[in-house]
Image (cartoon, grey):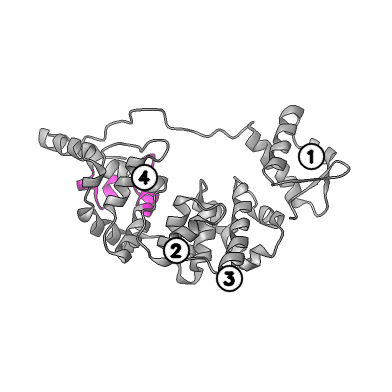
């Protein structure tokens, strides 16, 4: 349960000031120590945080963890790294094998993007995940967040790493809002940069710590404020934990959507040793228009390869 302290004019004023302060004026000095000390004591022992994971292990985890819970990622991650411990190992396989190994993690285009990134790492960087942020950002399938995360978590560099959990921590602790905007804004990026510790090593720990704090304590629903190391400084709590204002929070439906149909079609193709005839795929979903649309989308996205005679398979090239 979120505790809601009584507010006073002074407390409300402090919260309003924190919310209204320009990002450039934000100072995270008072937050750094409590948050990183909490992380040192409470961080989960996750395989991609261990030294032996290396930069490749960190990159694989970042691709898999996008919009996917840790509990679902863990078994697939471990199988993936056991099979493809280096980028070159994955690059040597057909992209369809990456889609097959991705299993039911969801958003399977991530598997193709990770395969493309591994191929680029092998071709451009001799098989080693590059250290430079700009080189990471130039890899296929790697956006600003992933480049910053790999540079920070794998190489200990100073970058603002803004995922959903971090954005929520900053929204509450600094700006006094229950939730961040639906899409990352320029103001949020500016705030994240302003809050970064100047020391590179501390900045990398801060990035990981704020992410973990959002995942374990400052959760979207039912934040455990009594366990939060910065509860006494949190602008949202000081303001009386006001309810969210603005556009409704987005929810993603699944049942009955094209995403569900795509998943069912891919499940058949992942299990198949030989190309799958059209009639086998037709049995997956009763509604023919939606089924055809989903299959066409998979082909368009490069996740399914059509062959002659109405047969389909996972991509080989």
Q: CA distance from mark 2 to mark 3?
A: 14 Å
Q: Spatial distance from mark 3 to mark 1, Cα to Cα?
A: 40 Å
> Sequence order check: which comes first, mark 2 or mark 1?
2
How packed mark 3 is, by other alpha carbons closer than 10 Å (few <14, some 14-19, many 20 or more), is few
Q: Are discs 2 and 1 less than 8 Å apart at CB? A: no
Mark 1 is surrounded, within 10 Å at the Cα level, by few (under 14), some (14 to 19) or many (20 or more) other residues, namely: some
Residue positioned 42% across, 38% down in the render: 183
Mark 3 highlights which residue?
126
Q: Nearer the viewer, residue 220 or 118?
A: 118
Pinpoint residue 4: horizontal percent, then vertical percent. Answer: 23, 37
Element under label 1? helix
Whole-number angstrom distance, CA of label 2 to CA of label 4:
24 Å
The label nearer to you, 1 versus 4, is: 4
Q: Nearer the viewer, mark 2 or mark 1?
A: 2
x%, y% of residue 238? 20, 39
In the rendered structure, are the residues bearing label 3 and label 1 in contact, judged by CB atoms less than 8 Å apart?
no
Distance of label 2 from label 1 (alpha carbons)? 44 Å
Dot 3 or dot 1, earlier in sequence? 3
Left or right, residue 8 beside residue 123? left
Question: Disc 4 designates what residue?
Answer: 167
Queried whether the magenta region covers residue 213, the answer comes back as yes
The stretch in magenta equals 211-234
Q: State the residue at coordinates (28%, 45%).
A: 225
Query: Could you tell me which residue is drawn at 49 percent across and 50 percent down?
Result: 143
Residue 79 locus on image (x, y percent): 62, 62
Residue 233, percent from left and from top: 20, 47
As measured in the structure, the alpha-carbon distance from the residue carrying label 1 to the one carrying label 4 is 41 Å
Left or right of 284 in this view: 165: left
Residue 20 in magenta stretch: no
| Mark 2 or mark 3, earlier in chain | 3
Q: Is residue 168 above or below residue 202?
A: above
């Amino acid at each position: 349960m979120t505790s809601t302290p009584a507010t006073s004019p002074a407390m409300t004023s402090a919260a309003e000031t924190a919310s209204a302060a320009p990002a450039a004026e934000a100072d995270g000095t008072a937050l750094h120590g409590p948050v990183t000390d909490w992380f040192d004591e409470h961080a989960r022992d996750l395989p991609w945080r261990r030294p032996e994971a290396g930069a490749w292990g960190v990159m694989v985890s970042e691709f898999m963890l996008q919009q996917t819970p840790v509990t679902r990622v863990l078994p697939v991650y471990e199988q993936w790294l056991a099979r493809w411990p280096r980028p070159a190992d994955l690059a040597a396989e057909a992209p369809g094998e990456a889609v097959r190994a991705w299993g039911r993690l969801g958003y399977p285009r991530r598997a193709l993007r990770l395969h493309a990134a591994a191929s680029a790492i092998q071709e451009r960087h001799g098989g080693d995940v590059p250290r430079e942020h700009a080189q990471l950002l130039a890899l296929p399938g790697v956006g600003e967040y992933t480049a910053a995360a790999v540079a920070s978590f794998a190489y200990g560099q100073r970058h603002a790493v803004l995922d959903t959990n971090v954005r929520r921590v900053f929204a509450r602790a600094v700006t006094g809002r229950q939730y961040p905007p639906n899409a990352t804004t320029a103001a949020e990026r500016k705030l994240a940069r302003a809050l970064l510790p100047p020391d590179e090593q501390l900045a990398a720990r801060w990035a990981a710590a704020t992410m973990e704090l959002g995942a374990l304590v400052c959760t979207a629903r039912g934040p455990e404020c009594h366990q939060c190391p910065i509860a006494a400084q949190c602008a949202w709590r000081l303001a009386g934990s006001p309810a969210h204002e603005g556009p409704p929070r987005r929810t993603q439906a699944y049942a009955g959507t094209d995403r569900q149909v795509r998943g069912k079609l891919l499940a058949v193709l992942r299990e198949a040793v030989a190309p799958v005839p059209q009639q086998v795929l037709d049995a997956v979903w009763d509604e023919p228009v939606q089924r055809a649309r989903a299959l066409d989308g998979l082909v368009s996205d490069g996740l399914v390869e059509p062959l002659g005679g109405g047969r389909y398979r996972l991509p080989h090239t």
